């Protein structure tokens, strides 16, 4: 195989891996939704994941945290579209958990800048911008504002993100 073909195979494998992880988190979300989501339920769920799926405690906790993220429709949709990997979900979870409510946008923006710097590349920056649009759409869905301003904000965001892609 030539180098281009190898990169292509790797790309397909990564897409399958992301899709498999999304499906796994969806299953955990479904199981989690059947509980009252108490601390005791969390402990039992982690233990069950470890027993049934033979994952570590840390992996079970990650699955459960990511299942909680999937309660946000925009995040779930982006994950299903292949825009979010396990690592992206972990960064989102940590960012949302650590940043105080008013500072979230600034914390997320700082983290995005670090990742763009480390990853270096237009493709990565564009994917990150699209993920941020998903977060923005999710945030807007929780705010009671008139439909027209909501649509204007989303159209402006999509214009900014997609104008050169």
Image (cartoon, grey):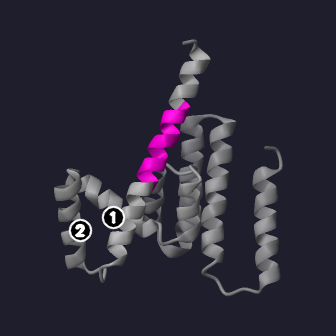
Q: In the structure shown, which secondary structural element does the residue marked by tag 1 occupy?
A: helix
**Quarter in which the N terminus is drawn:** top right
**Mark identifier at residue 151:** none
Q: Which of 90 and 106 is in front in this view?
A: 90
Q: Residue at x 28, y 53 (%)?
A: 59
Which residue is more in the foreground, 128 or 28? 28
User: Where in the figure is residue 46, as x and y percent of width and height?
Assistant: 22, 64
The local secondary structure at tag 2 comes to helix
Name the image quarter holding the C terminus: top right
Q: Position of residue 38 (x, y in %)?
A: 26, 81
Left or right of 111 in this view: 39: left
Q: Going 40% across and 65% down the picture, which residue do you hit?
A: 67
Q: Residue 45 carries which label?
A: 2
What span is colored magenta in the figure? Answer: 11-22
Quadrant of residue 62 in the image?
bottom left
Residue visible at 59% across and 66% down?
74
Q: Nearer the viewer, residue 144 or 42?
A: 42
Q: Residues within 10 Å of mark 2 (few under 14, many from 20)?
A: many
Q: Name the residue under label 1.
A: 64
Marks 1,2: beta carbons within 8 A? yes
x 67%, y 38%: residue = 123
Q: Nearer the viewer, residue 24 or 157?
A: 24
Query: Can you say whether 119 is above or below 107 in the image?
Result: above
**What is the C-alpha distance between the residues marked 1 and 2?**
8 Å
* 13 falls in the magenta region: yes
Apparent side of residue 163 relative to residue 108 in the rendered image (left or right): right
Task: Say few, some or many: other residues with alpha carbon within 10 Å of mark 1 (under 14 / 14 to 19 / 20 or more).
Answer: many
Q: Where is residue 25 in the image (x, y as percent from the top left)?
A: 40, 59
Q: Which residue lies furthest to the top in this view?
A: 2
Q: Based on the picture, tell me whether residue 28 belongs to the magenta stretch.
A: no
Magenta stretch mostly in which secondary structure? helix
| Rendering quarter of residue 44 | bottom left
């Amino acid at each position: 195989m030539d180098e281009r073909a190898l990169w292509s195979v790797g790309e397909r494998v990564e897409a399958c891996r992301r899709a498999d992880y999304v499906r796994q988190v969806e299953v955990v979300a479904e199981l989690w939704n059947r509980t009252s989501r108490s601390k005791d339920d969390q402990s039992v769920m982690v233990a069950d994941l470890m027993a049934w799926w033979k994952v570590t405690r840390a992996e079970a906790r990650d699955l459960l945290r990511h299942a909680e993220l999937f309660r946000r429709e925009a995040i779930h949709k982006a994950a299903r579209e292949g825009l979010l990997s396990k690592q992206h979900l972990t960064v989102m979870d940590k960012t949302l958990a650590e940043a105080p409510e008013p500072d979230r946008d600034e914390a997320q923006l700082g983290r995005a800048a670090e990742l763009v710097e480390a990853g270096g590349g237009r493709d990565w920056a564009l994917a990150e911008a699209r993920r941020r649009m998903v977060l923005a759409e999710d945030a807007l869905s929780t705010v009671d504002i008139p439909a027209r301003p909501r649509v204007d904000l989303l159209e402006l965001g999509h214009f900014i993100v997609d104008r050169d892609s």
